[in-house]
Image: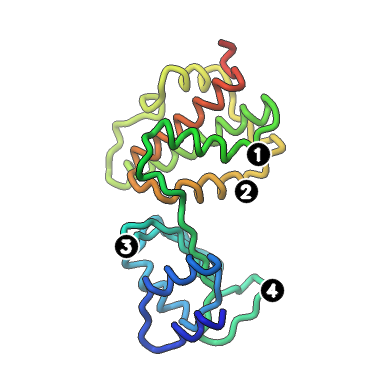
Amino acid sequence: MGLLDKLFGQQKVDVPRLLIAVARQSETGIVQVPYSVLEAYLRTHGSEHQSGAGAMECLINIDRERFKVVIDQCIFSNIKLKQGETLVTVKSGLDFSSMDTDEIAKVVKEGLSGFIKDSSTAHAASWQVINMAESDYMHGLWANEQFDVTYESLRSQLLSKFTDREQSDTQSSIDWDQFNSYLNDMTIGIEDARHKLQVFHSVAELIIKEWDLTGQ
């Protein structure tokens, strides 16, 4: 914390340098930079913004690396910030630059294995991965006024068979907040929306095959 305060407790702020410092040191730090300064920079240079309750998160590219950034005024937290301070969290995803889609999917699927204990959780996890992939991708298309693509048209034969015969199950024992956060954090580095959709679909296919969820 002290180093970050020393580096960035100043009027002119090098925000990219600040974010890199937080990411490299501990992923989370309290910095002596007003929330409004960070918010203005991230609104301009970041993407996929989400905000509310005195906090904001987004994705941003810095020096050819992609990060998830969360800035927080700690309005609903036990953390007490001084005037002009902001709680900053910066996470980078796994480096997939030298891997193809199938290789990435295997890594991500293994990362999710701790959430999958039996066929029931495998079923629920498969649906969640499919839903997350298609929801994010379709919202991107709709934002660009592309309304001619259907969810069904995006799916492989295996995924179509699974989704046609199985219902989504959100009542499983999986902690969905942790699951979603873990999946998103692992794949921060996948910037292209179509590629991310393909990876998520491949992850779901691997789970479906491993647990024989289509009865093949």
In terms of depth relative to the viewer, which is nearer, 23 or 181? 23
The residue tagged 3 is 63
Label 1: state its secondary structure.
Answer: helix
Q: Earlier in the sequence, mark 3 or mark 4?
A: 3
- Quadrant for the N terminus in the image: bottom right
Label 3: state its secondary structure.
Answer: loop
What amino acid is found at the position of numbered circle 2 in the picture? Answer: Gln
Q: Is residue 129 left or right of residue 36?
A: right
Q: Position of residue 189 (x, y in %)?
A: 40, 50
What amino acid is found at the position of numbered circle 3 in the picture? Answer: Asp
- The crowd level at tag 3 (other Cα within 10 Å; few <14, some 14-19, many 20+) is few
- The crowd level at tag 1 (other Cα within 10 Å; few <14, some 14-19, many 20+) is few
Label 2: state its secondary structure.
Answer: helix
In terms of depth relative to the viewer, which is nearer, 215 or 66? 66
What amino acid is found at the position of numbered circle 4 in the picture? Answer: Asn
Q: Earlier in the sequence, mark 4 or mark 2?
A: 4
